Amino acid sequence: MSCVSGFHCVVCGEATDAPKSAGVCPRCNDPSAVLEISFDLDKAARTLTPAALAERPFNHWRYRELLPIEPDAKAFTWPVGWTPILESERLAAWAGARRLRVKDDGRNPTASFKDRASSVGVLHALQRGATRIACASTGNAASSLAGFAAIADLPATIFVPAAAAEPKVAQLLVFGADVRRVRGTYEQAYDLCSARCAEHGWYNRNCAINPYLVEGKKTCGLEIAEQTAGDVPDWVAVSVGDGCTIAGVAKGLIEMHRLGFIDRVPRVLGVQAKGVDPVALAFETGEPTPPDGTTMADSINVAVPRNWRKAVARVRETGGCFVRVSDGEIGEAMKATGALAGVFAEPAGATSVAGLKRAIADGVIDPASNVLAVVTGNGLKDIATAMRLCGQPTEVDPL
Ligand SMILES: *Cc1c(COP(=O)(O)O)cnc(C)c1O
C-alpha cells in the first residue's frame, strides 16, 4: 500500500538505495546531504480518497500510502496523531491576527510531536529485525522513542545531554529505557550515539539523517490539511531546531495539495529562538553558521542543525519564511497560550505562537490572516520554566 517511489540526496539529487536506517548520501561526503523519500502520488490518489479515509482509524497510520513503511495490524492500535485543532478568539486578539487556531500536538501519547516520528522508527526497526534502537535527543525524541519502544517490546538506549529537562528524563526511566546522560551538549550526545550505533549495529533513530522518520513527522501536515479542508489557514507556524519537524509539516501540506484535498498550500512560518537561529540564517544566507547564544526552549536549542537543507527548501516551496523570537517573547506566548486558549505548552511548543505575533508585528504576516500554530510539546515537560514564569501560588491557611 505504501507508494514510495525512490530515495534521493538533497544535495546532488542522485537516486540512492533505501538505507537500512540512518544514512547520508554515499557520494556527497557531506553531513547535510540527507536523503529524501519520494512518493508516487498518482498511485496514492487511487486509494487515498476522502471516502477511504472516512473508514480508517483516527491515528496517523490512516495515511499509509504516504508513509515509508507498511503498518501491520498491531501498529494500527498504537495511539499517535489526529490531535485536535482548537480555535481561540482571545489568543488571536493577543497575537494580532484575525483568526488563530492551535494544533495541540502535546496530546500525543508521550506528550510531544516526536511520537509521529518514533512510531515510524520503532515499526521500521521491528520490520528490519533490529534487536535494539537508539537515539540522542534534547529530551522529547528520547521520551517518545522510549515510550514506543515499550509499547513494541523493543530495547532502547537513549543518550541525553546534561541539560535535558528532568521531567523528560523521568519519562525515559519510567518507560524502562537504558538511559545514558552524556556529560556534554546535545551535539556531543548525538556524536556518541552515532558512534555506538555504528559499533553495535543498533537501529539509529536520529531523525535528521533517518529519512523514514521525517515522513512520520509529515503526518502533522497531512492532518492539518484533512482537518481544515475547505477552510485552510493562510499560515502554519512551526518551531525549528534540527529542521525535521517543519520540513515534515510542509511536505505533508504540499502532498495533500497535490492530491486535491486542499485548494492551496498554506505558507509555512519557521520560528527560531533569537540566540539559536542557524536554520533562519541558512534560509537567508545559504549557510547555517553556528550561533553563540542559547535559549530556554531546550527542544529547539540546536546549534548544529542536521536537516536545515530540507527545512529551508520546503519553507521556500510554500512561499513561507523564518522569524526569530526572544526568550521573553516565548515566555509571554507560553502564558498567553495557557491563559487564553487553555493549552499548556512547553517553551518550544509556544515558540510557534510567539513567532506568529512577531511576524504580524513586523508586517511579515498580514493581520487580516487566518493563522495556525503547531504546539509541539506539552508544558508538563518543563515545569521549572513554567513556575519561573508564572510565580508561586498564594499561600493561605485552612479554615
Ligand atoms: C524536537 C522539537 C521541536 C523541533 O523539531 P526539529 O525537528 O528539531 O526542528 C520543536 N518543539 C518540540 C517540543 C520538540 O520536541
Image (cartoon, rainbow, N blue to C red):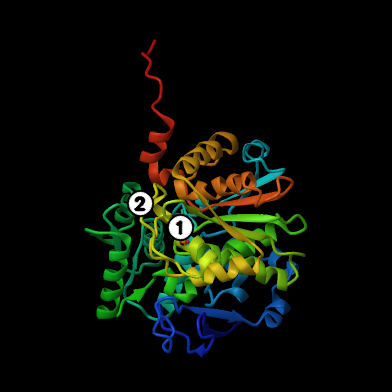
Vertical order, 368 against 24 (above or below): above
Label 1 near ligand 1 (CB < 8 Å): no
> In the displayed structure, does residue 83 sit left or right of residue 393?
right
Q: Say which element carries label 2.
A: helix
Where residue 241 sits, quadrant-wise, is bottom left
Where residue 284 sits, quadrant-wise, is bottom right
Question: What residue did someone put label 2 on?
Answer: 168
Pointer 2: residues within 10 angstroms few (<14), some, or many (20+)? many
Vertical order, 50 against 326 (above or below): below
Which quadrant would the C terminus be assigned to in this image?
top left
Q: Say which element carries label 1.
A: loop
Near-viewer residue (252 or 279) = 279
Q: Which residue is painted at 42% across and 49% down in the image?
A: 297
Q: Which residue is painted at 33% across and 49% down in the image?
A: 165
- The image's mark for residue 267 is none
Vertical order, 173 against 69 (above or below): above
Question: What residue did someone put label 1 on?
Answer: 277
Mark 2 vs mark 1, foreground winner is 1
